[in-house]
Image: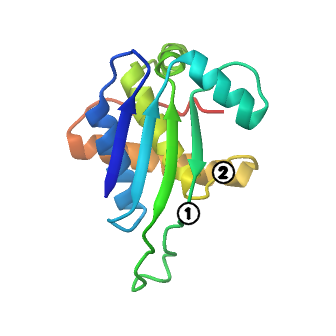
Amino acid sequence: MSIDVNNESGTEVDEQAILDIARYALTRMRIHPLSELSVIVVDTAAMEQLHIQWMDLPGPTDVMSFPMDELRPPSRDDDAAEPPQGLLGDIVLCPEVAKRQGEEAQTQHSMDEELQLLTVHGVLHLLGYDHEEPDEKAEMFGLQAAIVDGWRSEKGLTGPSPAPTVS
């Protein structure tokens, strides 16, 4: 799996953890191992510009996803099928917003923990998951929590995983 993490934010972030959790999420979702993903970490000014340009919403946001080849995980009924490979797209993260969200969350957590959660959230959006409707939200956030918990467990990290702060 080819995953590039490019930090343009000027804020020090745990790029290796972002890379690791993205790889874990894509493997768990059974995405082809030759697929490609780009993660870009930007400051609030850049994120605000993207948020206005693509969502027509003011202010910076925490994460945005820009799908390319619209890859989808194989269905559970199709275990024998080889998943297609391709360009998943780009995930854009904003550490300044992540830091604030982590501090304001019901279960306070670090900026890096929030960025890990947001990375999984972005991956799921690239794979076609959404949270506009209550049933979609339950499915996406349940899957998101399972992936983050699984990764944290595999890494031997203790304590509760961050609660979803993405709206």
107 versus 138 height, above or below: above
Query: Which residue has dot 1 on it?
Result: 69
| Residue 63 figure quarter | top right
Locate residue 136, reporting x and y percent.
Answer: 68, 54
Residue in front for this viewpoint, 145 or 64: 64
For the residue carrying disc 1, how many other residues have a C-alpha within 10 Å: few (<14), some (14-19), or many (20+)? Answer: some
Residue 34, by quadrant, is: bottom left
Provide the secondary structure element on which disc 2 rests. Answer: loop
Q: Is the residue under label 1 in contact with that under label 2 (CB below 8 Å)?
A: no
Residue at the extreme right: 56
Gap in Å between the C-alphas at discs 2 and 1? 17 Å
Q: Report x, y in % for residue 13.
A: 34, 23
Relative to 63, is 147 above or below? below
| Percent of width and height locating residue 57 | 77, 27
Dot 1 amino acid type: Asp
Q: Secondary structure at mark 1?
A: loop
Of mark 2 and mark 1, the one earlier in the sequence is 1
Looking at the image, which is closer to me, 86 or 82? 86
Which mark identifies residue 145? none
Q: Residue at x 36, y 38 (%)?
A: 5
- In this rendering, would 62 be left or right of 14? right
For label 2, the residue is 130
Res. 117 image quadrant:
top left
Toward the bottom, the furthest residue is 80
Identity of the amino acid at label 2? Asp
